[in-house]
Image: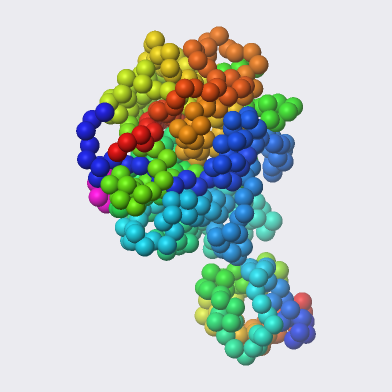
């Protein structure tokens, strides 16, 4: 997967959680939580959806790696290489 | 009636509802008077096509789609009707009553069945690997879920919980709300019932296994209490919440008062898992009458619980027959024939359908009575057409449930304080 493809996957999952989410001014290096009004249950939704789609197991200790769009890409890139 | 101080008299000052044939009281009243059925055919996982009552209402009027998705159908219904009720009462700004002095009491027949069935179905797509079991399952299935979703939405910080009372639950929660006001535990109560049961194939399948699921080529004719051709229950979703206040406060703010809850009672059959028991239902009605200080002949409308099962309808008619002797001013109807059986919401939705009778003096009809079962024949049954009375001052509302639970409420028109 490319960087853009991974970004699109994350945004698509967030869109599915909240179809009114507005990505227009999203800062990729800023916290997703603050910008998109996400809470811990939403992040668990993201983790679950990645598990369902790509069979990735993300341990709880790694959840902070999903804080921003950029950090999501960095974390997921090696794990989605073959996807 | 027994002399109570105004602080101990409980009145209904707001109504919010979602029924299979309306999403507000005015339309609901018009439709029950017209006998306009809200039952249609649905196609549900495993069970297939069945008649059911499904509600159409503005689901995002008071809550975002994201929150509806996270919560339950019962929560979605609850948030809508709670907001409608509190707006109807003119209390939505919480300037008179504090959030911490407000209680939410929700009657449920069951809860969590829909969510668990959905989760297991989802899990089956992943070879039953529990790593794919949702983190949403717990908060969605705790028994206080619908009441809790309402408190989160409205910022209510007083008590909230569910009253599990099978199909007697709506009335039971209404009684609970009144009792908490009388005890001084809260100053404002949102009380009623909610049903999301149409989302569960298991509910339909279980009624079918008991020989108690209504089937008819025309879904609007499937629910037919008292009729010879009745063959079971039509499962419906729905919700109805009442705003309850103490009379002194309601009068002081010049509130619109739908009626006073003058009598109520609950008891248990102590007999059977599923079969109802008329003699105990009669005792329950008598207890409610005693508490109200009323005689049977003082009741103008008996809104029956009858669900359209062979034995259940006869049991209730026998109970009414034993108690309401020589009551020429007492008329009998049934709301389920029009909206189906809204389970935990049934008692309160059915009461709401009759409350406007205090204003329009009409008794809405029981529909689908083409051939009255002689064993269900009672004096003054209102069938197929509404009946206009000289005056309607009292409504007795029956609601009974499985494992032998009975609840009766009596509401009286406010004529003078």
Question: Vertically, is B48 above or below B104?
Answer: above
Residue at 35% over, 45% down: B177
Residue at (68% x, 30% y) in the render: B220
Q: Is residue B291 visible in this depiction of the protein? A: yes
Q: Specify the segment rendered in magenta.
A: B180-185
Q: Residue at the location (54% across, 42% down)? A: B25
Quadrant housing residue A81: bottom right
- Relative to residue A43, is residue B315 drawn left or right? left
Image: B353 above or below A66: above
Q: Is residue B273 visible?
A: no
Question: Residue B326 vs residue B186: left or right?
Answer: right
**Residue A31 at x, y percent in the picture:** 57, 85
Whether A45 is drawn above or below B36: the answer is below
As for residue B228 lying within the magenta part, the answer is no
Q: Is residue B371 left or right of residue B192?
A: right
The C terminus of chain B lies in quadrant: top left
Which quarter of the rendering shows the N terminus of chain B? top left
Taking the spot 36% from the left edge, 34% from the top edge, the residue there is: B415
């Amino acid at each position: 997967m490319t960087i853009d493809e991974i970004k699109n996957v994350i945004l698509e999952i967030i869109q599915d959680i909240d179809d009114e989410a507005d990505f227009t001014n999203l800062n990729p290096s800023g916290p997703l939580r603050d910008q998109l009004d996400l809470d811990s249950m939403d992040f668990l939704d993201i983790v679950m959806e990645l598990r369902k789609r790509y069979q990735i197991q993300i341990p709880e200790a790694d959840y902070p790696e999903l804080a921003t769009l950029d950090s999501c890409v960095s974390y997921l890139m090696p794990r989605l290489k073959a996807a | 009636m027994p002399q109570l101080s105004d602080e101990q008299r409980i009145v209904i000052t707001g109504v919010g509802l979602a029924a299979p044939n309306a999403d507000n009281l005015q339309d609901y009243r018009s439709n029950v008077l017209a006998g306009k059925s809200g039952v249609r055919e649905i196609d549900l996982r495993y069970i297939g096509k069945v008649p059911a009552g499904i509600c159409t209402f503005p689901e995002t009027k008071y809550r975002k789609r994201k929150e509806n998705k996270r919560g339950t159908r019962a929560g979605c219904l609850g948030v809508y009707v709670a907001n409608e009720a509190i707006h109807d009462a003119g209390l939505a700004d919480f300037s008179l009553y504090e959030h911490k002095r407000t209680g939410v009491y929700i009657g449920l027949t069951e809860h969590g069945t829909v969510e668990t069935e959905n989760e297991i179905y989802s899990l089956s797509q992943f070879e039953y690997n529990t790593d794919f079991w949702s983190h949403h399952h717990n908060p969605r299935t705790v028994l206080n879920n619908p009441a809790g979703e309402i408190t989160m939405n409205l910022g209510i910080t007083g008590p909230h919980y569910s009253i599990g009372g099978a199909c007697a639950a709506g009335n039971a929660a209404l009684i609970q709300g009144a009792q908490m006001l009388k005890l001084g535990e809260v100053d404002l109560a949102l009380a009623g019932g909610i049903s999301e049961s149409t989302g569960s194939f298991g509910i339909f399948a279980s009624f079918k296994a008991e020989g108690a699921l209504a089937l008819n080529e025309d879904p609007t004719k499937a629910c037919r209490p008292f009729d010879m051709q009745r063959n079971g229950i039509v499962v419906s979703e729905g919700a109805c919440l009442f705003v309850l206040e103490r009379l002194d406060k309601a009068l002081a703010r010049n509130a619109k008062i739908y009626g006073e809850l003058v009598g109520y009672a609950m008891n248990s059959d102590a007999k059977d898992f599923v079969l109802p028991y008329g003699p105990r239902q009669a005792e329950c009605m008598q207890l409610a009458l005693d508490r109200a200080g009323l005689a049977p002949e003082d009741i103008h409308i008996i809104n029956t619980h009858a669900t359209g099962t062979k034995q259940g309808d006869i049991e209730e008619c026998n109970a009414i027959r034993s108690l309401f002797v020589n009551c020429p001013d007492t008329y009998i109807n049934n709301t389920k024939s029009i909206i189906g059986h809204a389970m935990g919401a049934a008692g309160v939705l059915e009461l709401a359908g009759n409350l406007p009778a205090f204003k329009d003096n009409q008794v809405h009809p029981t529909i689908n009575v083409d051939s009255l079962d002689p064993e269900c024949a009672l004096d003054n049954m209102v069938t197929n057409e509404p009946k206009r009375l000289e005056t309607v001052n009292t409504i007795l509302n029956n609601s009974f449930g499985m494992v032998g639970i009975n609840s009766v409420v009596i509401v009286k028109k406010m004529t003078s304080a």
